[in-house]
Amino acid sequence: MESRQRKLIRSLRFKLCLVLACIGILYTGFSCYRAYHKTMESIGFYVDEELAQIASVVVNYDMILPKTWQAPSFKRRIFKAMNGHIMLSRGFENPFLPIPSLNDLFDKHQEIIIAPIYSQPGETFYFPSGIEDGLYSVLINDRRVRAYVATNRANVRFVVARPFELMEALVNQAMLNSFYEFALLVLLYIPCMILFVHVMFIPVKRLAKELDARKESDLTPVTANKLPSELDVFIDSINRLFLKTSGALANERRFIADAAHEMRTPLTAISLQAQSLKEELLPDEEADKVHQLKQAITRQRKLTNDLLAFARSQCGHELKLSTFYIKDLFVEVIDDLGSLADNKDIDLGLIGECTDTITTDRTTLKSIVSNLVSNALKYTQNEGQVDLTCYQEKEHLHIVVQDNGPGISEDDLKKVFNAFYRVGGDTAKIEGSGLGLSIVKSACDELDAKIELSNRKEGGLKALITLPKTNQKNAHA
């Protein structure tokens, strides 16, 4: 038996889900990657634009901002130092305010700062002399800073700077958001994709169930109206196969029917001639030969009749429905086969009242019960017992034919409905054509009935037929 892993690998639905999932994940991942880098570019552009705008304000308004945004609560005097820089003073206690420095970004945790381009004594000079105005990235205390170098109208050079940490925080948040979006899309996309593929294959599963539910003799073409167009070639091939098989089966049934019919006429003539021979008037040796001849003719006529019945059962026919008491049918079968039971001293009878009625094809149902009872009588030992009974369960009627014979092995139970199969094969002691149960199975299919054979715990075989109380299939009242 094929392993589940091997079956999964061959599954078209699995391959389709896998391909769509990979495409969706790759596309979603690429989209999130693009969104992340676009966010980085946007934030970088925003920061650079912000620094340039601040520098432009400082230049256009001819001012330098202090290191904090809070206005002083005391009066200050503004004057120009010898080098032309603007300085602030308050009284004589602290003549000069501290000059802003790039180190204040980290020492005093400033988000943005405006400072002279030159450094104070003891500080690192971050910009070489003669550097052009514009945007630069520098390391201050091993931390990245984005800076804009500008020159005001008094030819005083300054820098507007902010740490990269804020930019990195925004970028990291953007990356985290992209990851959340990616995970959410994957979690939503994959189940939806699997569900979509499952829905796509529902018509195929429905067709498979319809084909499984068909009778063996039903070879009508498959309609592909509701199936994907990609399956049209496959459906056409199946229909062509059905057509070829139907033709082959029709030829086979015709041959069996014709052969059986051609055999019936000479067998009838031979049987009449053999019956005219009086065994009691012949010597013992000749009488024994005539008796064997009559038995062989009887067996041959039985085989011929079985072949004709099997051919008819395979061709199917229109049901003629009627309502009748099941007990009356049982009584007819017992009367027809009573002589066989008497020959082996078998107790053949009914169990229970069997007062239920049923609407179905009476002739077909009688054929089913007769074949089952005949088989039971054939395989049950002398002085055995064969019983018929029935019971109702909801909308179904159950017919039971059981005996106390040897039963059938579990392996044979699976094969006895095959045409020409006989328990024990050619070495079987009990003669038969191997067609009786095949005819029963075909007749049950015509009545939309189910048949099940099982061995009884107390010994013997039990045949259970389950059929609807009212049969409307292929009906002709």
Image (cartoon, grey):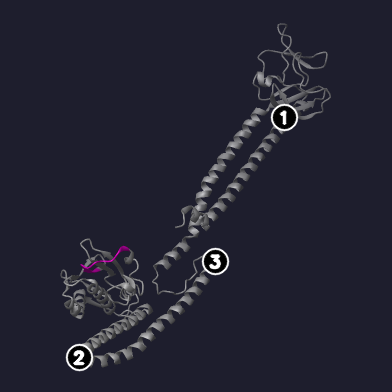
Closer to the camera in the image, 375 or 363:
375
Instruction: Report the magenta residues as a range.
Output: 398-410
Tag 2: amino acid:
Pro
Closer to the camera in the image, 50 or 246:
246
The residue that label 1 is drawn on is: 51
Q: Which mark is residue 283?
A: 2
Closer to the chain start, of discs 1 and 3, is: 1
Q: Is residue 355 visible?
A: yes
Label 3 element class: helix
**From the viewer's perspective, is residue 76 above or below residue 293?**
above
Label 1 element class: helix
Point out residue 315 in the picture as x, y percentages from the top left corner. 38, 79
Whether residue 231 sits left or right of residue 156 in the image: it is left
Tag 1: amino acid:
Leu
Q: Residues within 10 Å of mark 1 (few under 14, many from 20)?
A: many
Determine the CA span between mark 1 and mark 2: 136 Å
Q: Is residue 360 visible?
A: no
Please tell me which residue is depicted at 70% across the width and 13% down the height of the picture: 75
Residue 301 lies in what quarter of the image? bottom left
Point out residue 474 in the picture as x, y percentages from the top left corner. 35, 77
Q: Which part of the image, by quadrant, shows the N terminus?
A: bottom left
Residue mark closest to the camera, 2 vs 3: 2
Label 2 element class: loop
Whether residue 385 sits left or right of residue 249 in the image: it is left
**1 and 2 marks in contact (CB < 8 Å):** no
Q: Which mark is residue 229?
A: 3
Determine the CA span between mark 1 and mark 3: 62 Å
Point out residue 269 in the picture as x, y percentages from the top left corner. 29, 92
Determine the CA span between mark 2 and mark 3: 79 Å
